[in-house]
Amino acid sequence: PTGKEGSMTILQDAEIYRLRLQAGNSMELPFNPDRLIWVQMVAGNCTVAEERLSVGDGLGFSWTPEASTLQADSDAEALVFNLSPGH
């Protein structure tokens, strides 16, 4: 939200990340349990929170250790939103 490290300032309590993973790789989402997550698939397929997502799919969920890993089922690209639950 603040424009740190050359990022865009959005004036909201949110962070937006572009994630790219090669097939078979995974990434832990290092967020706070008090936050909400939205994953929007841009390319490929991945599994998160036991849900398989394809291009165009989106999934919103509360962060938990069980739902914190994104697994790329194919080469994948996604936007990951780290959001305040108050809005």
Image (tube, rainbow, N blue to C red):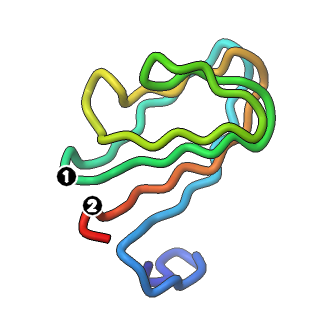
Against 39, residue 81 (above or below) is below
Residue 71 sits in which quadrant?
top right
3D distance between C-alphas at marks 2 and 1: 7 Å
Q: Do the residues bearing badges 2 and 1 touch, measured as CB atoms within 8 Å? A: yes
Task: Look at the image and tell me in which quarter the C terminus lies.
Answer: bottom left
Secondary structure of residue under mark 1: loop
- Name which residue type carries label 1: Asp
Q: Nearer the viewer, residue 49 or 21?
A: 49
Q: Nearer the viewer, residue 13 or 17?
A: 13
Q: Is residue 52 left or right of residue 12?
A: right
Q: Which mark is residue 34?
A: 1
Q: Residue 69 at what x, y percent from top left?
A: 43, 26
Q: Is residue 78 left or right of residue 82?
A: right
Q: Residue 86 at what x, y percent from top left?
A: 24, 68
Secondary structure of residue under mark 2: loop
Judged by depth in the image, the label closer to the viewer, 2 or 1, is 2
Residue found 38% across the figure and 40% down from its top: 61
Against 80, residue 52 (above or below) is above
Against 79, residue 26 (above or below) is above
Mark 2 — residue? Answer: 85
Residue found 41% across the figure and 68% down from its top: 14
- Name which residue type carries label 2: Pro
Q: Residue 52 at what x, y percent from top left?
A: 60, 19
- Check the image and name the residue furthest to the left: 34
